[in-house]
Amino acid sequence: MDDKFHEECGIFGVYKHADAARITYLGLYALQHRGQESAGIVSSDRHELHACKGMGHVADIFTEANLEGLKGDVAIGHTRYSTAGESSLKNAQPIQVVCSKGNLALCHNGNLVNAHEIRSQLEADGSIFQSTSDSEVILHLIARSHKPAIEEAIQEALLQVTGAYSLIFLTQEKMVVVRDPRGFRPLCFGWLDGSPVVGSETCAFDLIDADFEREVEPGEMLIFSENGVESRKVFAPARPSFCIFEHVYFSRPDSRIFGRSVYQSRYLLGKYLAQEQPADADIVVPIPDSGVAAAIGFARESGLQFEFGLIRNHYVGRTFIEPKQSIRHFGVRIKLNTVEDLLRGKRVILVDDSIVRGTTSRKIVKMVRAAGATEVHMRISCPPTISPCYYGVDTPNKRELIAASHSVEETCKYIEADSLGYLSHEGMLRACGDSEEQPHFCTACYTGKYPVEFPESALVQIGDPVPR
Amino acid sequence: MDDKFHEECGIFGVYKHADAARITYLGLYALQHRGQESAGIVSSDRHELHACKGMGHVADIFTEANLEGLKGDVAIGHTRYSTAGESSLKNAQPIQVVCSKGNLALCHNGNLVNAHEIRSQLEADGSIFQSTSDSEVILHLIARSHKPAIEEAIQEALLQVTGAYSLIFLTQEKMVVVRDPRGFRPLCFGWLDGSPVVGSETCAFDLIDADFEREVEPGEMLIFSENGVESRKVFAPARPSFCIFEHVYFSRPDSRIFGRSVYQSRYLLGKYLAQEQPADADIVVPIPDSGVAAAIGFARESGLQFEFGLIRNHYVGRTFIEPKQSIRHFGVRIKLNTVEDLLRGKRVILVDDSIVRGTTSRKIVKMVRAAGATEVHMRISCPPTISPCYYGVDTPNKRELIAASHSVEETCKYIEADSLGYLSHEGMLRACGDSEEQPHFCTACYTGKYPVEFPESALVQIGDPVPR
Amino acid sequence: MDDKFHEECGIFGVYKHADAARITYLGLYALQHRGQESAGIVSSDRHELHACKGMGHVADIFTEANLEGLKGDVAIGHTRYSTAGESSLKNAQPIQVVCSKGNLALCHNGNLVNAHEIRSQLEADGSIFQSTSDSEVILHLIARSHKPAIEEAIQEALLQVTGAYSLIFLTQEKMVVVRDPRGFRPLCFGWLDGSPVVGSETCAFDLIDADFEREVEPGEMLIFSENGVESRKVFAPARPSFCIFEHVYFSRPDSRIFGRSVYQSRYLLGKYLAQEQPADADIVVPIPDSGVAAAIGFARESGLQFEFGLIRNHYVGRTFIEPKQSIRHFGVRIKLNTVEDLLRGKRVILVDDSIVRGTTSRKIVKMVRAAGATEVHMRISCPPTISPCYYGVDTPNKRELIAASHSVEETCKYIEADSLGYLSHEGMLRACGDSEEQPHFCTACYTGKYPVEFPESALVQIGDPVPR
Amino acid sequence: MDDKFHEECGIFGVYKHADAARITYLGLYALQHRGQESAGIVSSDRHELHACKGMGHVADIFTEANLEGLKGDVAIGHTRYSTAGESSLKNAQPIQVVCSKGNLALCHNGNLVNAHEIRSQLEADGSIFQSTSDSEVILHLIARSHKPAIEEAIQEALLQVTGAYSLIFLTQEKMVVVRDPRGFRPLCFGWLDGSPVVGSETCAFDLIDADFEREVEPGEMLIFSENGVESRKVFAPARPSFCIFEHVYFSRPDSRIFGRSVYQSRYLLGKYLAQEQPADADIVVPIPDSGVAAAIGFARESGLQFEFGLIRNHYVGRTFIEPKQSIRHFGVRIKLNTVEDLLRGKRVILVDDSIVRGTTSRKIVKMVRAAGATEVHMRISCPPTISPCYYGVDTPNKRELIAASHSVEETCKYIEADSLGYLSHEGMLRACGDSEEQPHFCTACYTGKYPVEFPESALVQIGDPVPR
């Protein structure tokens, strides 16, 4: 129903807190936007692990009764989005197994680019797999490690994988947190009543009133045990590759990640967009909710009026029953409606954060015209999206990305806008506090330049031709 | 969890359309904001009525299978909000009965002020009641009418009741729509592919791509039958009493009701508020979602920057499990979070649409200060709410309305704001296109002057002292 | 899936017991065989009534949580069977209404033969009906009575209805129990820890360890109040018309009803059947479970070996998914399977309690032959069933009763048995302790002689020609 | 609520049948008595495997929709019972994994005695386990085999395990069936419309009208592929150890297993019991349902009357809510009730198939006395149960088996019977067609002599002292 990239996971963990399972539940609640397909929590009471997983939203899965069953003072949790084909309870996380290292549970945000190759090797060596998730590979590597200490086994395992991973492990005694050497996905660290907490974004800390201390650093391992918190650098240093799309679209605007306010980045994305791609128009209208901050920036910079000309329906359920006959604008009207009195007779600038296939943009442009707009100018607060992501974001393959095969003019024609303008790569980096010279961000989806190489098998899975 | 007045119902109907049940489902989908407790649809295939009702959201209640079961080409539907004590499936609408007039179903938005008295009389005369809803009274009066035609029996029944009612009746053959003489609650009329539709707000028409024709007029009855549409004036003319709170808060901003764009009214409410109650501050921040249009109006009029400094979590479920220990700001943070980088060091004007008990406003002010705001000025886009509503809105009793017993200064102190300003009664009327001299709106909740008198029994039910 | 008459209800009530809702739940549990479609309990805490109803089995509907919600020391409950067309939650009992007599709930086992006529009159007088159940008529008549005392209003109402009814009423203060003047359906009275209990069969008392005192007498009203128990004779005396099919099939064999052990009656039915309808055979096999006692009686009287040659599957669920292609004996094998080693080469007498349409009997005979029986002799422990029941039993209409239009020889041929024998009317009465001269039982389904007359409307509903 | 040994599983499979999933569903339906905790089906459409598993009864888990999803012409299924502690969906079967042999699913009835040891070794070698089931060990051994053909990998794996196993494997192309060398658990082979079927008992074939061909032989592997059926003997020959308790209690009486009618065995168990342990009494009463055939045998041999003096309630649900205060006989009355008129004043012989802890027997004896029996003689159709089972039956540990620590006299006293008699070991073997000299049955639970040795670890798990 939408035409966006999708974040694949949110993760959270708390160590030594009397209310560990509920705190984790709240953390997942705040991270719900990072994955609405399934969620799970595993807790440890130091004798055994307790688990509860389910399909759907956090608020629907967890009840008083099953939170009561999640005993113990350590807990980790996960929310997950997935493409339909692989969607099932057996892929829900945390994954929990028993192996040579004892009871072990894992939450993973990201994607391993060499998972397919390692899995083939592991299967050849006699391993059995119960999910289709790449994360299960990590547990097999740990189980096969001869290092007795769990943190060393984890390190040994991770030295064999490449790609994006923010990880939280739980054993009976310890919680171990790792972020990959390039730090693709965010991971924050803070304190709640003297207990350490980790979570994908700071908005999870705000809800529980935890104090943000710092981000887990790229390549850092944090070991939470009876001995307190220990930090280790377990990988060779690498240039950071923070996912810039977290600032452009994924993260909540009230979060701070990668050392920076998301709202602030989005405001500047809109501001620079107005500088680079002005339009002769009457009003600036955001495509809610994600386009709001950029539209405010655009409007203020351009001196045009900011108007909430599109209203989002927030009661959209997970299933939707279609009418038997087709209805104009139907697919998009389930989510968005126009305020006709605002749009009628106006030259309208629409501000959005991305065009993926172009199908939804085209419907929105039509709907805005049907509401009486005399001109519709589409402005996108980032460059054209031309390459799929292999680092933990659900993207269509290259063939489906309209900007991969169409010029800006062709795309403009397809979506039937009067003009179309994208922010430049340089403008995007600057808005997010980065520079072309020494970039900290991964912008592969805009450039096709992938910071971590991957075997062809990774591509074959997704069905794209190998990029050069 | 919130501290707002609540709309009690949304209603929808369609006559002679091949896809009647699904069209009604879509209509209710768009009217979900008018009641999230229960929903129902009754259809007619001209031989019998088919019903499906359930607790919860429209998207959760209706499945392909039960929409298939709602056979026929006429359907009416209802979404309902209710206070906890009376919440149950037996009060869900449409109410469906068999009586001397045959099969009969009813959807009601509004509240009868003399229902209690009539019900007592009906019980004394031997009627039995299966719900606690006032709407059941109407059906009893119809059943007892000796008029053979259903539309005349309805008229006879309604001449005995007073109060607020937008009604849709369904018999095997006809759909009958009535709006009370003062038109308290909205009701719109339009066409979809040549089939007539009615619904509480125009946003329901937008979703299904129906064309809005006009509002059902106060005191008008529309009879849809094989003979087409017939309009009758069935009551003595009365001065209109449109619920002004529909413009201030209830209706969706993309709707047009009472002959006017809701967004437009809200924008002007904010604009006049800025004129009447300016504040020396840096930024204007709406309390989302309802305060957005007013905040835009306020910001533009005052020349201050509009900022989205509070972010709403749209994944809030119907149940929420509390942590064991108390967490600061917790209750409000489930729904709203601050963007610290926007608020830090700023003098902030918060724009909201009402203060009911004051408890939530107080939490929001605290949370905004905790985010670093140096001053917090609360501005409300309507006058103080001092009296309960007896016309179909769920309001606390007078004792709980903070403005009923506290001056503006006292309320300001309670919510711990640096200043508090309300829009004047005159300003509110003007923003909604009305005048003090010849008002079309009911503003009883701001004035205590009730346009339709009611017996003391109506008050006793709600637990308030009788107003003078 | 089966081809039997069906009991339509079991009822239970307890007055002034600290654990009233749970005791009622247990009573319904024991009466589950009297209706598996829906069940409900209403309790009174002397201030208000609390209700819980649901579709399905008692064990599935009631949870700890909803039994907790059924507050108070008085409770009444109901289990219901219904034909598919009328099956829905709105027909589930107890029915609960508010009327001139206050809060009122009702459980009804039986059927009113003049309900249709009275309902038409009530509708003409302005009453509205929410269910299709005949029991709702009783509540309307009570509501319309001008007698102030509930027991007198009940009496006045019941003097207007004819037919079969064992009733339990609940008001906030009292429990009132009535059995119709002819006592069609059973109703027992006993004590549990000093608290009075009533229930359809004594097996409900056994489960809760209550002491059976006596049956509620035909035409008796028992009023349970703060003043203790009062018994009134509220109707003119009439000749009893106990439903003989309760002994033949409906009631549990461990119950005593109508002053007599059900098992004992069934044993004698089998014994006399052996005397009247002997067969030259090797073994006697019951069709379980209902045919067991009669088969034991038959075997002992005939001197033949009793063998459990048909085994019942007790895990049969309420829904059953059919295979795509047809399978021989499939429909009956879901419930019954043959013990081939017992049947092979044997001349078998099958003992069953009724043949309704004959379809199932035919399948069983075929299956027994397929297991190797050389001869199959069907013996039925009652006379041929030729007329429908209008007193609370779910029977097909006359056209579908094979014995109504076929001779015994024709029926035998249809079911493909080697011989078929029914018990005589006289034998049945004798086995149940009755006599032809002064019968206490209703045997209308065997004779077409109905002890209580009914208007033609009662027949029209069921679709039969009027009997002469 | 009961006090019985419990069968742990029923399994079923069908190869190359257009309606494979539904046929398997029906097979499980008929095998429901072998495990009511969870059930599952995995099918193959030759491209991928499809799975559906759930907690509860077969009739509740599978719907039209999810049977539709089980595409393909091969399917295997499993019903499972488990002790509470290990009860969960993750232990439900079929287990399904991906490994070096491709997609692989497994159904297992039985128990491996060296699973714990092998699992420890596998974990040390780096395997990870997701369930606590011993069956997962088999899949790991297969995955680690270097044999390319699945049937050879299975053979290699099974040569490493000892214990009881009737197994059905499913790959994308093949179905492989194996029974352990001693044949502890039954497994039957037959044909349905030309398609091969396998199942735990013949009653599963009866329901679908399949023709029983023969049992899968101990130590036999059947390979179903495009090439037809191939039989291999894959183990060294061993003396058979058929579980005699299948005849005494587990299997359905309408099944034939181990080459013999279960009903026939039970009848003879009762007959020989009457010879060995006569009692001076009036009537013989079975404890239904399992004691019926033995009671018929006992009655006929002793010349006493057989009476159905205990009636079983077949509507017992999986959960049962207790009354707040204790009720005499309550626990047992939920399942059984007495027919007082049969028992009053009688000297009663109760025939049952086992006494495990003695708690339920004690309650039944009390209840029968309370019904008026003057004497109660308990007769058990097998010897005293003194040792736990390690081959796939859920038994309490030795400490809880009353016969392990109490003489027959002491047990008689505990259950408060007037006399207690068990069938002799010799009598049991003879009734089941076996001899003391060359036994084909495992009778370890009666003798403590285990046909397959096991490591101490197997005992430690269950908590018993090591037997000598």
Image (cartoon, coloured by chain):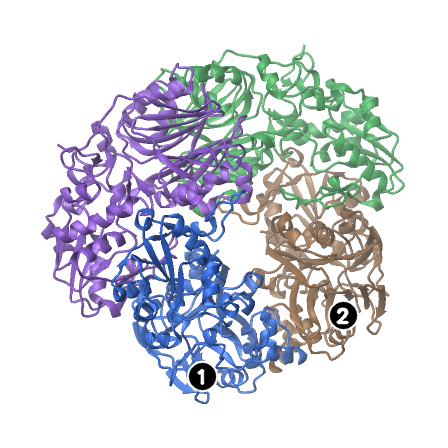
Chain colours: A green, B brown, C blue, D purple
Q: Secondary structure at mark 2?
A: loop
Q: Chain of mark 1?
A: C
Q: Position of residue D353 (x, y in %)?
A: 23, 49
Instruction: Give neighbour class at mark 1: few <14, some 14-19, many 20+ (Cα, 10 Å).
Output: many
- Of residue B404 and residue C447, the one placed in the foreground of this image is C447
Which numbered disc covers residue C50?
none
Q: Position of residue B416 (x, y in %)?
A: 61, 50
**Up-down relation of residue D73 to residue A158 (above or below):** below
Mark pair 2, 1: CA separation: 57 Å
Q: Hey, which quadrant is residue A313 in on the image?
A: top right
Q: Chain of mark 2?
A: B
In the rendered structure, which amino acid carries the disc numbered 2?
Pro
Q: Specify the farthest residue to the bottom.
A: C236
- Which residue: 39% across, 66% down? C421
Specify whether disc 2 shares its chain with disc 1.
no
> What residue is disc 2 on?
B451
Which numbered disc covers residue C181?
1
